[in-house]
Amino acid sequence: MATAFWGGGEGAKGASGFWASGHSPTLIAAFLYFDLAFMVWVLLGPLAPDIAATLALNPVQKGLMVAVPTLAGALLRVVNGLLVDRIGPKRSGAISQIIVIAGLMSAWTLGVNSFEGTLALGVVLGFAGASFAIALPLASRWYPPEHQGKAMGLAGMGNSGTVLAALFAPALAHAFGWNAVLGLACIPLTIVFVAYMVMAKDPPGAPAPKTLAQYLAPLRQADAWWLMGFYAVTFGGFVGLAASLPIYFTDRFGLTTVQAGYATAGCVFAGSLVRPMGGALADAIGGVRALTGVLAVAALALACVSIAASFTIALAAFVAAMLALGVGNGAVFQLVPQRFAAEIGVMTGLVGMAGGVGGFYLASSLGIAKQWTGSFAPGFLIFAGLAVVALIGLALVKADWRARWGAAEGVRI
């Protein structure tokens, strides 16, 4: 039975071994779900300049509007992790998708007419951001240990959905109005939902459900907090910038919403593309070395953004920052399973939650900085400082980590 389940025999070896070892339709469904979910998770970012103009929002309100989906997604990842354990990933994903589609349809038909309405919509979109805790277990549990990294990598490439939002939302808003984009987004979401229900299948051998106390047990260990802190900077920087750059480009350099969307898409694409490369680099040179380099580059690039006098310089600095943060995301998740192999599912949710909290902080702090000082620069400088703090923290723990984790043969720290 085990041989049949894992693809067995010669068919599970060689170049075709990965695809033969699991359930390809489920993997594809998980990717599509994750991709479209991430697209709508950051949807308010590309639409923010138009929404702010319609509702007369101030900089703090704009920052909170794009930050709330990130925070809601972070908190709901823990909820979804518990739900997956109890009713299975397929049904959990179906419920989440229905909530998001229903929320967007309601916002489109009823209209979003106030700042409070944008916050309510942001909470609904948080369910899309929490797809991380559903799509990855749905895909990876179908595959044997030697292929789970590839399965998680392919399903996790769905974070490229943020590029779709930046590319298409501003142009659609220009053509039909920003409120119509909320309804139009339901079309691809519904198509993917149907495909998901047809293609996805719960993996056999699901682990026993965990209580909330068991789920939070790793928080009693300092290593968990360090890893969460590093991911709060790397992924938090990535998703916070993805949500905030349309506002920055339009306010700082006077770009149109469509131009700002294209610029944001370029930056986000860079960060999404290199995430798998970050894991590969960490495998080659060690997660600590890789993370040390990218934190330094991210801090320098964000500091450069704060003093950039031209769009070209700012764009180049943002691309450099997103490349570094994308590599950093992969590097952190190279370290997590080495320390928490037995709690990898739980730690994926907790570390992912910390990343969302970091994104909320960055997006909201940029709005506050603009409101209080008239410039985004202090917000970027403070987040660059957080990257430096993370760099110092990594220097403090790396010797201990190498001594404790590096005892295992073949482990690079």
Image: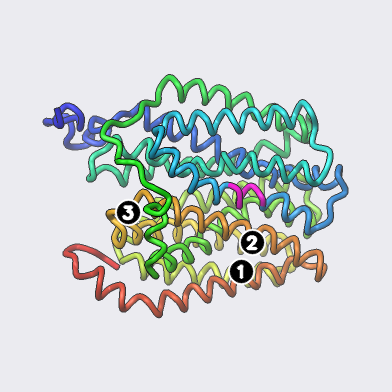
Span highlighted in magenta in the image:
68-72
Judged by depth in the image, the label closer to the viewer, 2 or 3, is 3
Q: Quadrant of residue 86?
A: top left
Which quadrant of the figure contains the N terminus? Answer: top left
Residue position marked by numbered label 2 in the rendering: 362
Q: Residues within 10 Å of mark 3 (few under 14, many from 20)?
A: some
Q: Nearer the viewer, mark 3 or mark 1?
A: 3
Reading the image, the residue beneath label 3 is 343
193 relative to 407, above or below: above
Q: Secondary structure at mark 3?
A: helix
Residue 71 in magenta?
Answer: yes
Mark 3 vs 1, N-terminal side = 3
Q: Give above or below for 199 relative to 166.
A: above
Question: Looking at the image, which residue is at 55% across and 37% down?
Answer: 37
Left or right: 110 in relation to 159 = right
Q: How is the image coloured?
A: rainbow
Which amino acid lies under the numbered mark 3 shown in the image of this protein? Glu
Query: How far is disc 3 from disc 1 in space, using C-alphas?
Result: 30 Å
Of mark 2 and mark 3, the one earlier in the sequence is 3
Residue receiving disc 1: 383
Q: Amino acid at mark 2?
A: Leu
Dots 2 and 1: beta carbons under 8 Å?
A: yes
Q: CA distance from mark 2 to mark 3?
A: 28 Å
Q: Is residue 319 visible?
A: no
Quick one: 187 or 95, which is closer to the camera? 95
Residue 318 image point, x, y percent? 61, 60
Residue 39: tell me if it is visible. yes
